[in-house]
Image (cartoon, rainbow, N blue to C red):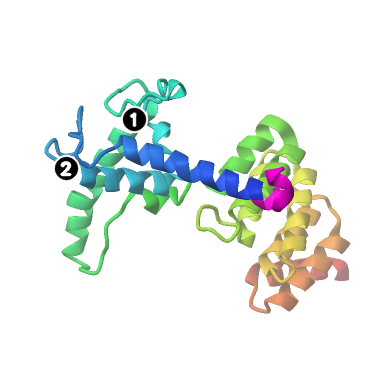
Amino acid sequence: MFLTKINSKYFFQMLILAIVLLTRTVCNAQFSKDQKPKNLKVLPSNIEGEELKKIMQGFTAALGVKCNFCHDDSKTADFGPMDYSSDVKKEKQVARTMITMVNNINSDLLKKSREIESDIGEVACVTCHRGASHIDQLEDILFRTYKRGGLEAAMSRYNELRKRYFGSYTYDFRDHTLLSFSSKVSEQGNVDDALAIVLKNCELFPESSPSFTFLGDLYLKRSDNEKAISNFEKAVRLDPNNRFANGQLKKLKDLEKK
């Protein structure tokens, strides 16, 4: 009866939003500013709860995760509190190592650098993580996926990540990423797969001179000089100062004259 009086789609959207907000509220409520932190091995032992809470929120935002990424939530299924002091999760051990590393960089390495250049900021988790729990480069993720499942799996993964992260700072979706991935594939002797990757890149970046340069080079590896010349010419039209494409064109046209 109630649902007939309001838009059901709107109702469920609001319901989902309420659940998300409730989850965040529960997580924050469990970590009271008046609660004395326990089992601190890297952070200062006398840190106040409110300050620690802000630090933890910075970590979760930097990695795009929630509290239970590092903290034991085995009791939360029964509406019990999260065990922040537990060391049961390996991610918490890794986090301590990472915090130590960041502190050392800021207090030692960057301190020395500031003696030369004063206008240097500090590094933080977000400097490398940029909203992802792991700091892999996109081309490395694609190449690992390729080795496990082939080209279709790798490109499916690319499309998935592009849909989710494009426009953010987490992964680099500029033209050179797929070109780097194609180079790794080509080095494995899989020229046809590398060619398919670069063709996709040319669709995404039709004004990218490097993409057509790569395409020309791959056609050259397949001994298809005609297509190689065509793509090198397009690369030069897009960027007349493309030295590699100009050089390859000259070599190929000199061969045609012989």
* Mark seen at residue 48: 2
Label 2 secondary element: loop
The span from disc 2 to disc 1 (Cα, nearest Å) is 20 Å
What residue occupies the far left of the structure in this picture?
46
Please tell me whether mark 2 or mark 1 is closer to you in this view: 2
* Nearest to the observer: residue 231 or residue 17: 17
Measured along the vertical axis of the image, is residue 42 above or below residue 196?
A: above
Who comes first in sequence, dot 2 or dot 1? Answer: 2
Label 1 secondary element: helix
* Nearest to the observer: residue 163 or residue 144: 163
**Figure quadrant of residue 146:** top right
Q: Mark 1 sits on what residue?
A: 92
Measured along the vertical axis of the image, is residue 94 above or below residue 117?
A: above
Label 1 sits on what residue type?
A: Lys
Q: Position of residue 148 (x, y in %)?
A: 67, 30
**Figure quadrant of residue 244:** bottom right
Q: Position of residue 26 (x, y in %)?
A: 39, 37
Residue located at (79% from left, 66% from top): 231
Residue located at (71% from left, 76% from top): 238
Q: Which residues are magenta?
A: 1-10
